Image: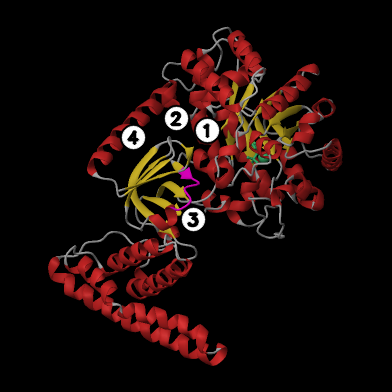
């Protein structure tokens, strides 16, 4: 049994089989047993694979010798020597003959164990040799598995996905019926991969650093997305304990969902609109079944990221039409493309050394205004069909807002000229997610119709902490007093001119912050669909006046730790059951 601690990013507990997504290989080796009488057959398969790999390596060696000279070719000799190594072979034979494992599992398990020990060696030379072992493992598995290899796109049964990394577009494309949880080496709580996991209700832990080399495909694994724990090859007692925890969590979620349709009104009568964040129109249904008041953020760039094909006006329109029609009069807040940084534009990709500070979001729209125009036209057309708001991402100065509004006006004129229907009073709002915007909130508030605070980016840009980097994840904290000062500045500026202000960053879905956010004066919180019932539930159990006093006190505190302790305590007082919120 091995226990790893990472960053919990999506709640829930999953117990099942590990599927290891090797870089480029995507091979899973289930722990398969064979009947004792078939053991010698498995040994023969292993020997045949060894012979083929030896021939393959000899061939590569001969070519390499010709082209590059003897020293480099010597590296390949090490691999052929390893294939003849007595101890290594004995270990594989024992797994087959004594433990009755299949040849591929015996090879994968033995070679990965050896590689792991080597990579932990204090000797650099030995540590580097670990990759030779893993390379050999891949070659042997290629031979042993042949056509039988299983890839991510054709999984036959439910798995827990283990990988070094997963990009947002890969996560968006996961088959949710098969990938039931995931755990990866890299990432932070507000990386887009983590956000998608929450939206898909897949328990997930990120930032585990070594999980992709510690796990073997086919291992039994527990992924505890509430506590950020992953347990490989758990013993029976641990399995039993986690089955109980899994059940408790499911029961708690079910109890919350029962009350999902009650409005989120505080005990002293203040209504909070708890909305949902979505990436694709198909998610509107999930948002409504969790009791969302509307869609507070539609991350439309996933229409492109999921398919890899830039949507034309009709594709955009269809996506918005579908969403609006399902919403039955509720509002859809459609954000224009927020591409760049970790949401890599597959077609226009340019290498940047600081992509989060580079060509991202509204800056991409300004560079390629034709795509922006197309999207704006589709959003305007959809506004004739229901309640639609248009939201601009990553505004960092008033010039960007004015530029976008200028284009929106031009497109409106084009539509008018062609007699195409749209809502002339469509609200145009902006994401507040860059400190420069927060500091200019009073100016911006006079030129738009609503603010939505994007804490995922606001925190990273305020604290200079990459939101997706596991090495600095401990420094990424919404409760940092600098972040809270900016939140207050935004809310106060909005209040001065009666501008609606909401929050759609992940902070809005964290129970520990609900009291503070209500107290600061926010009345719109947009969260991942599964978080809607719990945030509504908290809102119903508190007094606005008390939340205001709590927020006032928080603003006097100067240390993040003290703020968190205080908020945790206040949540516990309001909701004695709060530890269950994960
Ligand atoms: C944010 O930055 O808080 C936000 C909601 O936008 P995204 O997570 O898509 O960057
Ligand atoms: Mg953002």
Which disc is residue 529 wearing? 1
Image quadrant, ligand 2: top right
| Disc on the earlier residue, 2 or 3 | 3
- The alpha-carbon separation of the residues under discs 1 and 2 comes to 16 Å
In three-dimensional space, the C-alpha distance between marks 2 and 3, rounded to whole angstroms, equals 25 Å
> Mark 3 — residue?
164
Give how far across and how far down residue 305 sits, in percent. 61, 52
Residue 399 image offset from top left, x and y in percent: 87, 39
Mark 4 residue CB less than 8 A from any atom of ligand 1 = no
* Badge 4 or badge 3: first in the primary sequence: 3
Toward which corner of the image does residue 293 lie, by quadrant? Answer: top right
Which residue is labeled 2 in the image? 582
Q: Main secondary structure of the magenta part?
A: loop
Q: Quadrant of the C terminus?
A: top left
Which of the pair 89/195 is nearer the observer? 89
First in residue order: circle 4 vs circle 2: 4
Q: Which residues are magenta?
A: 205-210
Please give the residue where the numbered disc 4 appears in the rendered image: 246
Is residue 563 rendered to the left or right of residue 74? Answer: right
Label 2 element class: loop
Say if 29 sits above or below 167 in the image: below
Q: Is residue 556 above or below residue 311?
A: above
- Label located before the other in sequence (1 or 4): 4
Circles 2 and 3, Cβ within 8 Å, touching? The answer is no
For marks 4 and 2, give the CA distance.
12 Å
């Amino acid at each position: 049994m091995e226990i790893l601690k990472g960053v919990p990013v999506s709640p829930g507990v999953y117990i099942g089989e590990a599927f290891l997504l090797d870089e480029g290989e995507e091979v899973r080796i289930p722990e398969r047993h064979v009947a004792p009488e078939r053991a010698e057959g498995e040994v023969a398969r292993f020997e045949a694979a060894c012979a083929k790999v030896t021939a393959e390596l000899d061939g590569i060696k001969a070519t390499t010798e010709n082209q590059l000279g003897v020293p480099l070719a010597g590296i390949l000799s090490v691999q052929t020597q390893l294939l003849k190594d007595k101890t290594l072979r004995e270990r594989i034979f024992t797994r087959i003959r004594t433990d009755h494992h299949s040849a591929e599992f015996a090879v994968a398990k033995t070679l990965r164990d050896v590689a792991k020990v080597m990579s932990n060696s204090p000797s650099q030379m030995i540590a580097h040799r670990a990759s030779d072992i893993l390379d050999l493992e891949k070659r042997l598995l290629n031979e042993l598995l042949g056509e039988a290899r299983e890839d991510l796109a054709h999984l036959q049964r439910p798995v827990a996905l283990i990988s070094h990394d997963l990009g947002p577009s890969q996560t968006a494309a996961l088959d949710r019926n098969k990938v039931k949880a995931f755990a990866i080496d890299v990432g932070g709580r507000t990386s887009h991969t983590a956000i998608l996991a929450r939206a898909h209700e897949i328990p997930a832990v990120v930032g585990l650093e070594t999980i992709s080399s510690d796990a073997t495909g086919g291992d039994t694994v527990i992924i505890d997305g509430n506590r950020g724990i992953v347990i490989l090859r758990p013993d029976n007692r641990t399995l039993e304990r986690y089955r109980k925890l899994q059940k408790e969590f499911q029961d708690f979620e079910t109890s919350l969902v029962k009350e999902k349709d009650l409005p989120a009104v505080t005990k002293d009568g203040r209504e909070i609109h708890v909305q949902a964040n979505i990436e694709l129109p198909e998610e509107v249904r999930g948002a409504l079944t969790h009791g969302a008041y509307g869609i507070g953020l539609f991350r439309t760039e996933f229409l492109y990221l999921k398919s890899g094909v830039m949507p034309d006006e009709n594709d955009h329109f269809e996506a918005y039409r579908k969403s609006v029609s399902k919403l039955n009069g509720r509002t859809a807040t459609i954000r224009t493309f927020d591409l760049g940084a970790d949401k890599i534009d597959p077609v226009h990709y340019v290498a940047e050394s600081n992509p989060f500070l580079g060509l991202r979001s509204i800056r991409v729209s300004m560079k390629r205004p034709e795509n922006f125009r197309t999207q704006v036209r589709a959003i305007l057309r959809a506004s004739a069909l229901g309640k639609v708001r248009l939201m601009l991402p990553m505004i960092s100065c008033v010039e960007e807002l004015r530029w976008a509004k200028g284009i929106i006006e031009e497109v409106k004129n084009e539509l008018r000229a062609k007699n195409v229907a749209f809502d002339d009073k469509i609200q145009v709002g902006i994401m507040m997610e860059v400190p420069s915007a927060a500091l200019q909130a009073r100016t911006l508030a006079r030129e738009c119709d609503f603010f939505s605070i994007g804490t995922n980016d606001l925190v990273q840009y305020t604290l200079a902490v990459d939101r997706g980097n596991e090495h600095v994840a401990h420094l990424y904290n919404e409760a940092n007093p600098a972040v809270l000062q900016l939140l207050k500045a935004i809310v106060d500026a909005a209040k001065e001119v009666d501008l609606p202000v909401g929050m759609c960053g992940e902070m809005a879905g964290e129970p520990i912050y609900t009291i503070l956010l209500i107290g600061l004066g926010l009345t719109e919180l947009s969260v991942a669909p599964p978080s809607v019932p719990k945030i509504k539930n908290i809102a119903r159990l508190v007094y606005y006046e008390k939340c205001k006093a709590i927020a006032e006190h928080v603003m006097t505190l100067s240390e993040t730790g003290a703020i968190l302790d205080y908020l945790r305590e206040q949540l516990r007082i309001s909701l004695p059951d709060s530890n269950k919120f994960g």
